[in-house]
Amino acid sequence: MNYPFGRKLFHIDCVLLVIKWALYSFTKSYGQKCFNEGKNIKVNGLCPGPVKTSVTVSENSSLLRGDIPNKRIGLPEEIAELALMIVYSSMYGMNGHIIVCDGGETLI
């Protein structure tokens, strides 16, 4: 799941919003289902904010930075490191959660 739609009000397409919430709900419900069935499976999701890509390296980047408290767009490597931390850590207690990594954008 990308970008924190649903965690903060954005003017976006309704279909996209429904899909984002479906993924959010699926992560929580399937995480609980796996736990209840005694499976050793962790189900978590990442919700990054804007990430620097070839698409965001335009003049829109400065507009995006204005909404982010730490005043910069995230890097793909930062999201990858967070994903690796979740996958390879021994955080068995974390299950059914969405981790928001948006530079503080949803705090506003």
Image: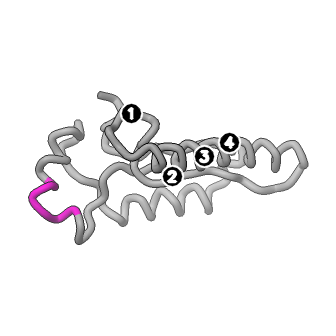
If you read the primary sequence from the N terminus, does the residue marked by circle 2 or circle 4 appear first?
Answer: 4
Q: Amino acid at mark 3?
A: Ala
Residue at mark 3 to residue at mark 4: CA–CA distance? 10 Å
For residue 8, which numbered disc appears in the image? Answer: 1
Start-end of magenta stretch: 56-61
If you read the primary sequence from the N terminus, does the residue marked by circle 1 or circle 3 appear first?
Answer: 1
> What residue do we see at 23% from left, 40% from top?
68
For residue 28, which numbered disc appears in the image? Answer: 4
Res 105 → quadrant: top left
> What residue do we see at 82% from left, 45% from top?
33
Tell me if residue 1 comes above or below residue 52 in the rendering.
above
Residue 93 vs residue 105, the one in the foreground: 105
Residue 10 vs residue 95, the one in the foreground: 10
Q: Which residue is mark 2?
A: 46
Mark 2 touching mark 4, by CB under 8 A? no
Count of number-bearing discs:
4
> What residue do we see at 17% from left, 46% from top?
65
Residue 29: x and y in percent read 73, 42
Q: Amino acid at mark 4?
A: Lys
Tell me if residue 78 comes above or below residue 16 in the rendering.
below
Mark 1 touching mark 3, by CB under 8 A? no
Q: Circle 1 sits in a helix, a strand or a loop, which is it?
A: loop
Residue at mark 1 to residue at mark 3: CA–CA distance? 16 Å
For residue 22, which numbered disc appears in the image? Answer: 3
Query: Does residue 18 appear to the left or right of 55 in the view shown?
Result: right
